[in-house]
């Protein structure tokens, strides 16, 4: 099979399952990240023949895609904020919306000195690692309840040569309040998809990504936001900043929650798609 035929094979096998633009994205990633072929190579070398081993690898990838397994899990990594991250079913695949959150924090604080930053619910470590890479003078801390997620985050910190202090903690456990000092910034992208919203989710998310990192009970949609607010109310320095990624339908409710916990300067920021996605607030002096 030639490279040209392999490209056609991917598109024919997946055309009934995915949109054309998504298949094109899959093909680009497969050829570049798995086989080391650039877009130019696909044209110049289109008549080069795949080895039998490479073709078997390609067939395996396509067969897993047919089962809606995320490509990032299949190849074992993804890109986030220009950095490479290992991902697996123990952690969520980082989303573009979260890049917007990271970008905001970096731009808000790039001229600040001696920052102590905490990422609550770090997962793959995409937020903590990206902040550490772009705010190199900051001291970065990260919590997650999952030991396996923390192992992945630690790997990503090593890959990207960022020093981060990781701790296995449950933000719902009030006993953690006495264990840590103060922070200038606390950020969290906690579970915020209601269980009733499952039916709107894509099959690849529902079948493969960790439910505990995604979903909250309909009756308690802001449970993690409230817990982080309580923690931040005690552990943020005066004037310190709190950042959340939020469910688009709860901008007003998150804003009210922040007011109730004594935060000020509250802003709800829309993402690139015009949906309420980021909440930012300050601890009063």
Image (tube, helix red, strand yellow):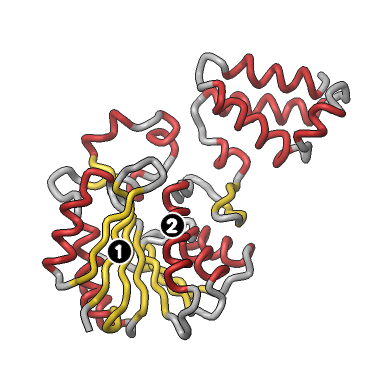
Q: Report crowding for label 2: few under 14, some 14 to 19, many 20 or more residues within 10 A (C-alpha).
A: many
Residue 188's x, y, as percent? 34, 62
Question: Residue 90: percent from the left, percent from the top?
Answer: 46, 50
Find out whether the residues at labels 1 and 2 contact each other: C-beta distance under 8 Å: no
Residue 283 location, quadrant: bottom left
Q: State the SS at label 1.
A: strand
User: Between residues 115 and 156, which one lies in front from this camera angle?
Assistant: 115
Pointer 1 residue: 280
Local packing at callout 1 (Cα closer than 10 Å; few below 14, some 14-19, many 20+) is many
Q: Quadrant of residue 147?
A: bottom left
Describe residue 5's horizontal placement relative to residue 17 as left or right: right
Q: For the residues marked 1 and 2, what is the alpha-carbon distance in whole angstroms?
A: 21 Å
Residue shown at the point (56%, 26%) measured from the top left: 21
Residue at horizontal 61%, vertical 67%? 158
Is residue 10 visible to us here? yes
* Tag 2 secondary structure: loop
In this picture, is 125 found above or below 20? below
Q: Which residue is mark 2?
A: 123
* Picture coordinates of residue 141, whole percent (x, y): 43, 74
Residue closer to the observer: 102 or 229: 102
Q: Position of residue 86 (x, y in %)?
A: 58, 52
Q: Is residue 105 left or right of residue 235?
A: right
């Amino acid at each position: 099979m030639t490279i040209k035929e392999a490209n056609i094979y991917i598109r024919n096998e997946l055309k009934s399952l995915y949109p054309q633009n998504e298949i094109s994205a899959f093909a680009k990633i497969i050829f570049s990240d798995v086989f080391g072929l650039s877009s130019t190579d696909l044209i110049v070398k289109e008549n080069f023949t795949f080895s039998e081993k490479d073709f078997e690898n390609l067939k395996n990838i396509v067969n897993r895609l047919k089962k809606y397994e995320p490509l990032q899990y299949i190849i074992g990594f993804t890109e986030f904020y220009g950095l490479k991250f290992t991902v697996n079913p123990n952690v969520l695949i980082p989303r573009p919306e979260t890049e917007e959150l990271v970008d905001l924090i970096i731009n808000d604080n790039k001229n600040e000195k001696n920052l102590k930053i905490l990422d609550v619910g770090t997962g793959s470590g995409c937020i903590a690692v990206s902040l550490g890479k772009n705010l190199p003078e900051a001291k970065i801390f990260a919590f997650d309840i999952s030991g396996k997620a923390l192992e992945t985050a630690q790997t990503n910190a090593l890959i990207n040569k960022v020093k981060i202090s990781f701790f296995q903690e449950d933000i719902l456990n009030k006993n953690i309040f006495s264990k840590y000092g103060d922070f200038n910034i606390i950020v969290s992208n906690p579970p915020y998809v209601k269980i009733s919203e499952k039916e709107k989710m894509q099959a690849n998310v529902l079948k493969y990504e960790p439910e505990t990192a995604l979903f909250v009970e309909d009756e308690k949609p802001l449970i993690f936001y409230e817990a982080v607010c309580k923690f931040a109310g005690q552990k943020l320095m005066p004037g310190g900043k709190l950042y959340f990624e939020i469910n688009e339908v709860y901008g007003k409710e998150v804003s009210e929650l922040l007011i109730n916990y004594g935060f000020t300067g509250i802003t709800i920021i829309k993402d690139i798609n015009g949906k309420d996605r980021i909440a930012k607030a300050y601890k009063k002096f």
